Every structure is written in C-alpha cells, then in structure tokens.
Image (cartoon, rainbow, N blue to C red):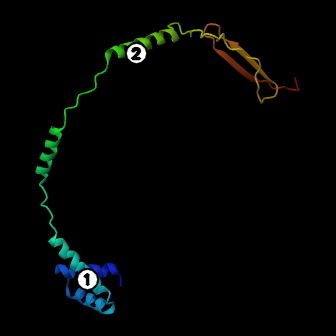
Amino acid sequence: MKNERIEELISKELDGELDAAGESELRDALDADPGLADVRDDFVNIGRMMREADIPEAKSSEAAWQDVRREIRALPESRPKRIPWKWAWGFATACAVALAVFFRPDGSAPAIAGNQGTTVEFVATELDDAMTIVNVDPQSGVTVIWIVDVENDDEG
C-alpha cells in the first residue's frame, strides 16, 4: 500500500472526515505495519504544534496597501541628475565639427594624413585565366577591383 494513501487517510481521520471504508482501510494498514503508528503520532504532534503556534493575524489588503503607500511617501525625494550643460554644448560642438570635417556636402571624403590613396600591386584569385580590372575614382578615392572569368573556346 502506498504511503501517500495512508498519510491521506491519517489526515482525514484527524480532521474527522474519514468514512467507514477509509477507517477500515486505515485500521488494516496500521495492523499490517506497526511503523505507521509513528507516522500517525507525527501527524498528531505537527497538528498540536500548529495550533499552539503564535501566528500573527494577517492584515487586510487595504491595510497592506496603505503601508506600501506610507513607505513610498517616506522615501527621500529623488531628483533627476542635472546635465552639466557646458560639457554637453562642448561635446555637441565637437561632434558637429567632426561631422563637417569627415562628411562633406559634395560626397567626397577628406584626405587623411599619410593616406595618398590605394595602390594595388596584384590580385590573387583561384580562377584560371581570370582577368582583373582595377579602377580608382579620383574624386572619392574609392578603389574598385573587377575579376572577370575569361572562357577559352578552342573552336573559334
């Protein structure tokens, strides 16, 4: 017999909810296994301790909510941090100058010191008989590399 079922029967007996069939089943189990009497005694002791425990009466939800509101009002007033506007204006000015220097209205990029453009010496590819075309745009300084696969026809 499963212990959960016996524990349920013991609990119902202590609560006065056990019917005649359950009472008979519990008596048979207690006769078959004397160790179950200790389980029953443990249940009785737990019940007694719970009845003797000093449990404070629970507050109503209204009273609990009032406590929360009182705690919130008691908190120190928090003010948002003030932004040091002198630093903010300085940062905004620096960003505007950087944008004006690096992004010009005509779409060209400034020449960065030491960067005189891109030089392509060779292009490596895994294609046999590939033809490469390198083009550097003088206005923007952008380098474009095309790799064209040339097919050899033996017939023509």
Camera-side residue of 10 and 149: 10
141 up-or-down from 64: above or below: above
Instruction: Classify residue 29 by image quadrant.
Output: bottom left
In this rendering, position of residue 142 left or right of residue 10: right
Instruction: Classify residue 40 by image quadrant.
Output: bottom left
Residue 98 in view here: yes
Do the CB atoms of the residues marked 1 and 2 lie less than 8 Å apart?
no
Total numbered badges shown on the rendered structure: 2
- Secondary structure under tag 2 reads helix
Residue 91 numbered tag: 2
Which numbered disc, 1 or 2, marks the residue that appears first in the sequence?
A: 1
Camera-side residue of 20 and 91: 91
- Secondary structure under tag 1 reads helix
Residue under label 1: 40
Residue 11 in view here: no
How far apart marks 1 and 2 lie (CA) works out to: 77 Å
Mark 1 residue type = Arg
15 up-or-down from 64: above or below: below
- Label 1: few (<14), some (14–19) or many (≥20) C-alpha neighbours in 10 Å: some
Identify the image quadrant of the C terminus.
top right
In this rendering, position of residue 25 left or right of residue 124: left
In this rendering, position of residue 38 left or right of residue 54: right
Tell me what residue is drawn at x 19 percent, y 34 percent: 76
Q: Position of residue 3 (x, y in %)?
A: 34, 81
